[in-house]
Image (spheres, grey):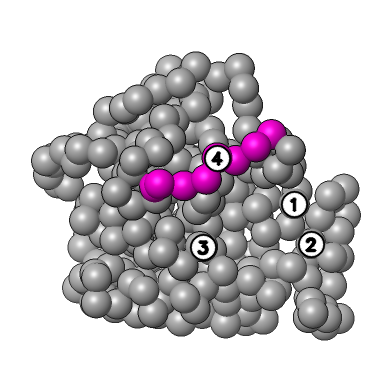
Amino acid sequence: MLPSLTPTEVERYRRQIMLPGLGETGQRQLKKTTALVTGVGGLGGTAALYLAVAGVGKLILMRGGNLQRDDLNRQILMTDDWVGQPRVFKAQETLTNLNPDIEIEAICEYVSADNIDALVQRADIALDCAFDFAERDALNAACVRWGKPMIEAAMNGMEAYLTTIVPRQTPCLTCLFPEKPEWDRWGFGVLGAVSGTLACLAALEVIKLVTGLGEPLLGQLLTMDLARAEFAKRRPYHDPQCPVCGPMPEVTRSDPVAAKMPEDQPAIVALPPLC
């Protein structure tokens, strides 16, 4: 049963409730949703902001470590006086001030095999915004185990990619990257507008998947070269022998989710590592 909206919530979300395909039912679906955000930095923090103001009922923010001054060019939930302190608690404070009608839980830990299963089970959907493949793979595997959708978003310099992973219906992260590259998270530049652009699109994927508004990126990988403003949709390879999500039954075109998957996109087997 969907929760009702308070008069304050009706007023707060009035302009988006006006959207065809969202409406009050969609807003109530958002209110019922718990979203797990791993990696509350320039990407995860910005995505969390737009989920908060959209009215997602509960956000679980997960990120270890303290804020550094060179984070401030992109981590818009932070302030300069918070440098040296755990960033996830500042994110919680900022989002609570923006929207006191939602619940926000802050966990000052990195994703690990010891903590991720319990968190995924508590969530309806997850956003993968972590800074390395170890965390990303752990979240991906847990989402597959528990049948929870995951928004996968990553960037490298001026390039980015985005996809929506639904277990038993789409390729998982291991299908996309069966071999994990070595990379230094300090080894590439980051422009705040790039992470912000990707974060907005990631938040939109959550909203679309929860409410049925528009068409989410199911079975599609959106790649972006923001230096050239070039965008492309590709169809990732779904490995039937994937060690994480396979073997899996075939999804037929009669399936309502599969019906949204494009048949005319070129297949890809691997992509450059973007994180």
The quadrant where residue 75 appears = bottom left
Could you tell me residue 202's position as x and y percent? 52, 48
Marks 3 and 4, Cα distance to the nearest angstrom? 18 Å
Q: Decide which of tag 4 and tag 1 comes sooner along the chain.
A: 1
Marks 1 and 2, Cα distance to the nearest angstrom? 8 Å
Q: Decide which of tag 3 and tag 4 comes sooner along the chain.
A: 3
The quadrant where residue 239 appears = top left
* Residue occupying the point 36% across, 30% down: 159
- Residue tagged 1: 212
Q: Amino acid at mark 2?
A: Gly
Q: Secondary structure at mark 2?
A: helix
Residue range corresponding to the magenta coloring: 246-253
Can you tell which mark lies on residue 250?
4
Marks 2 and 4, Cα distance to the nearest angstrom? 30 Å
Q: Secondary structure at mark 3?
A: loop
Marks 3 and 1, Cα distance to the nearest angstrom? 16 Å
Q: Are marks 1 and 2 in contact (CB under 8 Å)?
A: yes
